Image: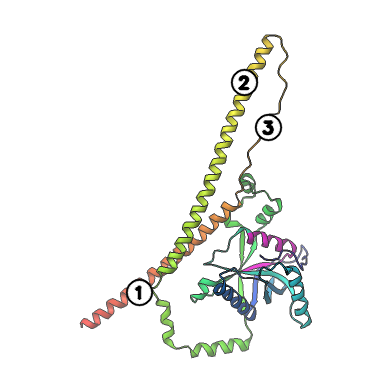
Amino acid sequence: MASRGGASRRVPENEAAITYVQCDGLAVMKIVKHCHEESYSNMEVAQGALLGLVVENRLEITNCFPFPKHDDTMDEEEYQLDMMRRLRRVNVDHFHVGWYQSADVGNFLSQSLLESQYHYQTSIEESVVVIYDTKKSARGFLTLKAYRLTPQAIAMYKERDYTPEALRNLKIGYESLFIEVPIVIRNSPLTNIMMSELSEMIPEEEGSKFLDLGTASVLEGQLRSLMERVDELNQEAIKFNRYQQLVVRQQQDKHRWLLKRAQENAARAAKDEAPLPEEDVNKLFKPHTVPPRLNPMIVAGQINTYSAHISQFCSQSLAKLYLTQALQNAKEAKQNN
């Protein structure tokens, strides 16, 4: 998991907020290479550190390096400090400005990611987390997004109170955990010239891949993931319903006990006897532990993400089907004539 603290620097409170992220093409290529290598080799989540600097209201990402794989003999913080020292010696930007992580079909929301970004953002004010989607990028759609925690999410993690009342007071839900920061990829003029020349060298028939109708496997994977998340959310709902039933039953028992004690004291008062000693009701009926609502909120966010991707994917597939049907009809009409 991403290191949480290492070489941090605090930014003054009056510094302008980050309005967009500018990422160099070299850093993007390093992120893409690392994420795809991890995805193809062992299917693990790829993570790494982002280096750069803040210029006015722009966060510039100029370099990056991957985190080491889980090894008990290696200290992650010491590794990052050593990497930044070596980069500084060769006159490369070495300020820590965030971290990156790979994702599967845009679904990156998790408790570990929230906690890591909280530690980053509280120690490095301008830090962002960059999410790279390996699956969508492999199909020809480069997906690179930058996120920051909202003030409500930071307050929630600072208080460490995930009860329904606390979340309701903060007015926080899965849709208000992160705020997306626009990201722009910057290349040098020479790189842009080279890319223009390469684009002219691509044969025209290569564009026919966009009409590929083999969508069943992708849709099946997304639906399976959606079903798993719905089952998990259902289990969380069962736990919370059980807690509410226990609370109602305890309130009824507490009410019966108070009524019985009042009747006994009334009977003792009629006999001119001293009332029974006062007892703390909360000691007799200990309140049940409220199940935390953070995990259900995260699962609900994952369900929302999968649903949005399935809806978008299906609409694109339907458009392709209608287009191919029109082409097929035109071809048949031409053959009949």
Q: Residues within 10 Å of mark 1 (few under 14, many from 20)?
A: few
**Residues under numbered marks 3 and 1 in contact, where contact means CB atoms less than 8 Å apart:** no
Q: Quadrant of the C terminus?
A: bottom left
Select label 1 or label 2 by which is in front.
2
On the image, which quarter does residue 254 sit in? top right
Residue, disc 3: 282
Find the magenta span and give its range. 112-130
Q: Quadrant of the N terminus?
A: bottom right
Q: Residue at x 31, y 73 (%)?
A: 325
At label 3, the amino acid type is Asn
Question: Is residue 80 part of the magenta span, yes or no?
Answer: no
Q: Residues within 10 Å of mark 3 (few under 14, many from 20)?
A: few
Select label 3 or label 1 by which is in front.
3
Residue, disc 1: 323
Given the current orientation, which residue lies at the most extreme front position?
A: 73
At label 1, the amino acid type is Leu
Residue, disc 2: 260
